[in-house]
Image (cartoon, grey):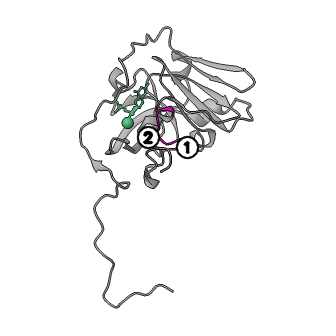
């Protein structure tokens, strides 16, 4: 039974709720650990490689023919900026994974330029992750990961690999680029999992 004093309607809530330690930004900062790769669409492909070595491949045209979804999401960078209500369009990882037979529990995401990031496979499924190629009604700009990036908004934004080239499914977890350098293996902004040990 909650104890409620008469006339008490709770303390005023802030208009928006941010994960701990985050501040709001209106602009869209660019964070890249290297130069922006230029990925031509005629040779672009996205692959999902299973732990058994089976490769599932989509050309740009094949990917665009898959059902797309519009997504509005809040994004949270470990450098403490958060941006609310960002608007994307892309293909759900559920769609891409629907024909993939795997026993893997983990995924390593690979990008053009060599960036990698790891996450549990279940965090890519159930409407939680997209291969995004439009931002705010426009083609995704190269500095933000175009032609296509991963979008996994429920984890810190370093998990949303820009210029994504493929996903490798793994039976055992392995650290990606920032995870090797001391960032948290999972990276839940609401639990403030910035660094290993948080
Ligand atoms: N390939 C690649 N993906 C990346 C990064 C990167 O350096 N290379 N930086 C990550 C980090 S730390 C963040 S916060 C976001 C930044 O995305 P933005 O530049 O579109 O804001 O991309 C993530 N994805
Ligand atoms: Mo970041």
Q: How many marks?
A: 2
Mark 1 CB within 8 Å of ligand 1? no
Label ID, residue 127: 1
* 144 versus 121 height, above or below: above
As drawn, the residue found furthest toward the bottom would be: 6
Q: Is residue 25 left or right of residue 192?
A: left
The residue drawn where x is 39% and y is 28% is 134
Q: Is residue 186 left or right of residue 56?
A: left
The residue drawn where x is 40% and y is 35% is 88
Q: Quadrant of residue 63?
A: top right
Residue 129 position in % (x across, y down)? 52, 38
Q: CA distance from mark 1 to mark 2?
A: 10 Å
Nearer the observer, 20 or 180? 180
For label 1, count other residues whose C-alpha is less than 10 Å away and answer few (under 14), some (14-19) or many (20+): some
**Magenta segment boundaries in residue numbering:** 180-186
SS label for mark 2: strand
Label ID, residue 140: none
């Amino acid at each position: 039974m909650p104890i409620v004093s008469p006339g008490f309607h709770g303390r005023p809530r802030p208009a928006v709720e941010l994960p701990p330690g985050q501040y709001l930004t209106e602009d869209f900062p660019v964070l890249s650990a290297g130069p922006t790769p230029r990925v031509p669409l005629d040779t672009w492909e996205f692959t999902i490689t299973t732990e058994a070595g089976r490769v599932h491949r989509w050309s740009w045209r094949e990917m665009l023919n898959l059902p797309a979804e519009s997504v509005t999401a809040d994004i949270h960078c470990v450098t403490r900026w958060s941006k609310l209500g960002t608007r994307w369009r892309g293909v759900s990882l559920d769609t891409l994974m629907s024909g993939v037979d795997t026993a893997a529990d983990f995924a390593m995401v690979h990008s053009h330029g060599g960036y990698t990031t790891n996450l549990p496979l279940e965090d890519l499924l159930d409407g939680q992750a997209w291969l995004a190629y439009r931002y705010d009604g426009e083609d995704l700009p190269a500095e933000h990961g175009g032609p296509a990036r991963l979008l996994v908004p429920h984890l810190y934004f370093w998990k949303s690999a820009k210029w994504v080239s493929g996903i490798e499914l793994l039976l055992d977890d392995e650290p990606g680029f920032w995870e090797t350098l001391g960032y948290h293996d999972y990276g839940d902004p609401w639990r403030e999992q910035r660094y290993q040990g948080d």
